[in-house]
């Protein structure tokens, strides 16, 4: 049976939500993201793109390119709320769907043509989302995820496009090679240096040539350029790691402040592990200095989710990694090698009182929020905290203003 894959994308999602909440922002240039000089554009309205603004750009540069733009810091909780409404509508309509980000979905409609016209069915669902949420939305429909995603991008803004089976290559051929998913700025420049501009040229090349230039990724890009993709729609992807990091508005060498932030990060992520009934066996610390050089160290540990075990180990990693001669721009920590399980008392080092204390603190956090109970040493890290359980099967909300 041939596949029918739907890709759905909420157009300029953060911008659209802000405009729902403030109608005066309609049709005005809008930037969402970090408001400081070191902030990054998380989303930008179409009105700003004619000035060369794009997401991921430094906010300072975006403001220089489009000085009349309104700059908004953004609200992760508000975006999650609207995303959940869209998710519930999609869940009503389709048998299998994958939420690949807060504003992007895939759905497998294979076989539904026997009962409905898939394109008409997807159109009705799109109309319902627009009607009930007020958010603009685009979709692409084709035989696989890659072509559907490209079709969505070609349909934007606020439109829809179907690519019939067998027409994938002709559809992709005239497009820029930059529109192939997985082709970032560096890969694009490499291909342009080879004289490649359109997807058609990649289609005409032997796969082996692409592999010689780009290694294994070259083969993947060649297949995508030819509309070949067998990636399934995955309803749930279990997280293998959890992390957090913060960029400073001003570079710092305040060791006590850095240690306090690391403690707050560790305490919060350890709570997320316990809330999700997870344990970690590998921890790492990352430091980015003022010269943008970035270093990290990791350590394998016995499976745990306990603050009093994780914090000293994180601080040891930081002590070994930190170079006192340079200012620090960013710090972060990451827990990986996650498995399901609850923290078990250590026969020799732990007491029943420690476990009772963790239970009591976690119950308070569940009721009053992540930051309702904090160690005194981490109280200066005001932005450390999460809006939701990171192990609920949904992708994380990614904003570009996590600053200190």
Image: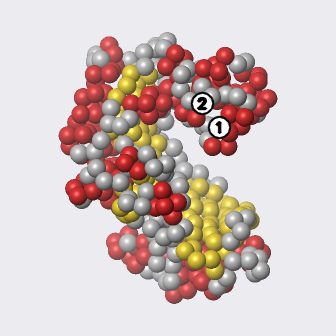
Farthest residue to the left: give it: 131
The x and y percentages for residue 303 are: 65, 62
**Residue drawn 59% across and 51% down?**
240
Q: Is residue 272 above or below residue 363?
A: above
Residue 224 vertical placement versus 321 (above, below): above
Q: Is residue 241 visible?
A: yes
Question: How far separated are the C-alphas under marks 1 and 2?
Answer: 7 Å
Q: Position of residue 280 (x, y in %)?
A: 62, 61
Q: Decide which of 25, 105 is in the foreground and name it.
A: 25
207 vs 157: above or below: above
- Residue bearing mark 2: 177
Please report whichever mark, 1 or 2, sits nearer to the chain's N-terminal start.
Answer: 2
Q: Which residue matches tag 1? A: 188
- Name the residue nearer the viewer: 21 or 157: 157
| Disc 2 crowd, CA 10 A, few/some/many (<14, 14-19, 20+) | many
Residue for point 62% across, 62% down: 334
Quarter holding residue 304? bottom right
Residue 71 in which image quadrant: bottom left
Q: Secondary structure at mark 2?
A: helix
Q: Foreground residue, 257 or 199?
A: 199
Horizontal side of 211 relative to 244 (left or right) equals right
Please state if 202 lies on the left or on the right of 386 as rendered.
Answer: right
The image shows residue 165 at horizontal and vertical percentages of 46, 14
């Amino acid at each position: 049976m041939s596949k029918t894959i739907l890709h759905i994308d909420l157009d300029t999602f953060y911008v659209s939500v802000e405009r729902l909440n403030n109608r005066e922002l309609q049709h005005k240039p809008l930037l969402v993201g970090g408001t400081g000089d070191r902030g990054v554009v998380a989303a930008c309205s179409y009105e700003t793109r004619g000035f060369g603004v794009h997401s991921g750009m430094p906010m300072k540069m975006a403001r220089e390119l489009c000085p009349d733009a309104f700059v908004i810091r953004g609200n992760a909780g508000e975006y999650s709320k609207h995303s959940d409404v869209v998710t519930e509508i999609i869940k009503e309509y389709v048998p299998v769907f994958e939420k690949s980000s807060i504003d992007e979905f895939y759905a497998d409609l294979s076989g539904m043509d026997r009962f409905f016209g898939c394109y008409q069915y997807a159109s009705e669902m799109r109309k319902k989302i627009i009607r009930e949420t007020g958010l603009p939305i685009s979709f692409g429909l084709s035989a696989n995820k890659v072509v559907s995603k490209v079709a969505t991008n070609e349909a934007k803004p606020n439109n829809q496009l179907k690519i019939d089976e067998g027409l994938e290559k002709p559809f992709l051929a005239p497009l820029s090679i930059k529109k192939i998913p997985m082709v970032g700025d560096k890969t694009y420049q490499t291909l342009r240096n080879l004289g490649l501009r359109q997807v058609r040229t990649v289609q005409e090349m032997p796969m082996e040539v692409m592999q010689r230039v780009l290694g294994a990724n070259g083969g993947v890009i060649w297949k995508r350029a030819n509309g070949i993709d067998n990636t399934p729609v995955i309803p749930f992807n279990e997280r293998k790691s959890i992390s957090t990091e913060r960029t400073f508005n001003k570079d710092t060498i305040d060791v006590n402040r850095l240690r306090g932030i690391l403690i707050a990060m560790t305490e919060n992520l350890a709570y997320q592990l316990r809330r999700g009934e997870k344990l970690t066996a590998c921890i790492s610390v990352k430091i980015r200095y003022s010269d943008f050089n970035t270093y990290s160290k990791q350590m394998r540990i016995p499976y745990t989710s306990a603050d009093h075990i994780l914090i000293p180990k994180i601080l040891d990693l930081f002590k070994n990694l930190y170079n006192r001669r340079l200012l620090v721009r960013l710090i972060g920590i990451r827990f990986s090698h996650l498995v399901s399980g609850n923290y078990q008392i250590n026969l020799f080092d732990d007491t029943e009182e420690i476990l009772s204390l963790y239970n009591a603190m976690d119950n308070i956090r569940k009721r009053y929020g992540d930051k309702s109970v904090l160690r005194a040493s981490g109280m200066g890290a005001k932005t450390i905290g999460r809006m939701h359980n990171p192990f609920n099967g949904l992708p994380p909300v990614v904003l570009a203003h996590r600053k200190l």
